[in-house]
Amino acid sequence: MNPIHRLWFVVLALSVTGLGGCTSKSNQDPPNTLRMATPSKIKSLDPIYADDLYAGTEVSRAYEGLLQYHYLKRPYTLIPNLAEAMPQISADGRTLTFKIKKGVVFQDDPSFKQTGGKGRELVAEDFIYSFKRLADPKNTSPGWWILDGKIVGLNEWRDAAGKSGADYGKAVEGLKAVDRYTLQITLKQRSAQFLYTLAMPFTYVVPREAVEAYGKDFLNHPVGTGPFRIQEYTGSTAGRLVWVKNPTYRPELFPSEGEEGDKEKGLLADAGQPLPRADKLVVQVFEESQPMWLTFLSGKLDAAGIPKDNFQQAVTANKELSPELKEKGIVLAKNADIDVTHFSFNMADPVFGKNKLLRQALSLAYDEAQFIDLFYNGRAIAAQGPIPPGIAGYDPNFRNPYRQFNVAKAKELLAKAGYPNGEGLPPVEYATLSDSTSRQSTEYAQKMFGAIGVKLKVNNYSWPEFQSAVKNKKGQIWSFAWSADYPDAENFLQLFYSKNASPGPNDSNYSNPEFDKLYEQALQMSDSPARTALYKKMTEILVEDCPWIFGSHRIAFSLTQPWLRNYKRHAFEHGTAKYLRVESALRK
């Protein structure tokens, strides 16, 4: 669910996507207003289309799911959200029974005609409707992959919907409302990862009344159970979004426990206080890094990442906060992200899809170590495979033979591929973004590949256009990043599962029966040495087939203003804004 362009993620999302921003109406805002930022215009506020980190962050203001992550605990821990408790699980691990919290209501909205615009109570049937809507082929949700083949009868319902239209009144065997507040989900097979999907924006619950009332415009009219409600949003071209506290939000309290050191950092000062902690959020779109950075320095942004060109201004040689920023009370936090950057080869392309030696040659020609120095200021480690540090399956000692920068070897393989010194190979179509940092990284790629005689034909896009191009398989190579949806290596390995090919998350359109077999076998296993061994085998297959040029695993450097309270870097930050507040007496 979390594709991110590799350079923009460094500039902003790497550190605090969704945390910070400015507003031209700040003098009209209540004192406890979060000023936030996003590096991309938000194409939709409909959960089933929240297929990137930026859209997912905004969707989570208004919508919620059955489960969520504990804000403070590490390792990351799932806890109930709209469920009363974690589910009862049958002995065979296939049937999950959830009790839904009583008294939770959807936000007030004119679509609730029977109640005069008052939001009605959430019930178990709402989740069944929302899951079916995600499965409905007419909606072409990019999130279908998280349920595909998982729930008994849901694929059959989807197949029937594709032939004769979706019948939302038709029962699905694996989705049952046992009573008004009890939801039962039956899986086709035991799954160690399924619970994680219930904390993802794709599975957030929506009311049928609003979907039907707004029709195609529902994506601009969020109506959820969440902590905030939209006040200003003009669609996919909007330069900002404004959210206000939802007055009908259910009782939910700031956590009273965390990990060691949280109390000393002041992260438990609000323990037991009602959520959300802020009264308003103003989210400004910054498609270039420098305006964002200057806005942060002026105190009109509550948090920010550090653009590569400003890194030396903000951080000393020993990677500590500069004295100038420290004097302002700004706080620096450093955290390893669970992510991987990469170049994807379009395996559906007749040139690259059938020529492994060509892919391996380009992988050898790309110097990631220099890229990390130039663009990440050393804030990353070179990736040898798809699995990042911090989760089972990552091997710090493994070295990918095709990710060791070696121009001579690259030229040798290029010749074996049929293109000595690049002769006979037309310019390669490369899809990228149009912002300044992306342009610089493209120039670097042109230099790297040009050294072995390979030329790039560059196609620049906006973020929504870029996503559309990738999903429609336009181009031969593109640069991307994947930030974990949940803390399991499966979330990275599913990016190569053939059934997840575009428009699903397998943007390289890679297909290997041996890999698929191991992947499906691993799905039925819990975390264990045996499953980790399978992950290792799958990584070895990917390394040899080379559908990606593996890039980096990055380290987030987060800057926050002295008046921002309760900020703690979270790898799965959907819904985390409800914990933040402003100490207004300290704000400029």
Image: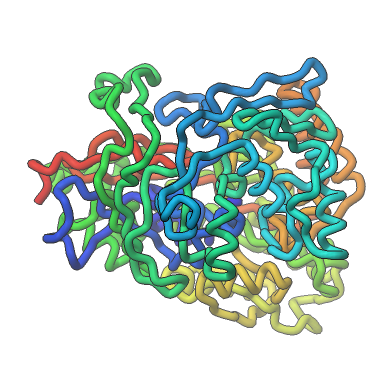
Rendered position, 347 above or below 277: below
Residue 148, given in percent of the width and then of the height, sits at 78, 47
Identify the residue shown where x is 36% and y is 24%.
Answer: 255
Q: Is residue 167 left or right of residue 49?
A: right
In the image shown, does 181 or 527 lie closer to the viewer?
181
Identify the residue shown where x is 39% and y is 56%.
Answer: 12
In the image shown, does 86 or 455 lie closer to the viewer?
86
Identify the residue shown where x is 37% and y is 30%.
Answer: 251
- The quarter holding residue 385 reads top right
- The quarter holding residue 4 reads bottom right
In the image shown, does 418 or 246 lie closer to the viewer?
246
Q: How many marks?
A: 0
Residue 447 makes an appearance in the image:
no
In the image shown, does 430 or 159 lie closer to the viewer?
159
Rendered position, 203 above or below 46: above
Rendered position, 386 above or below 462: above
Q: Is residue 358 left or right of residue 163?
A: left
Residue 493, given in percent of the width and then of the height, sits at 73, 44
Residue 289 makes an appearance in the image:
yes
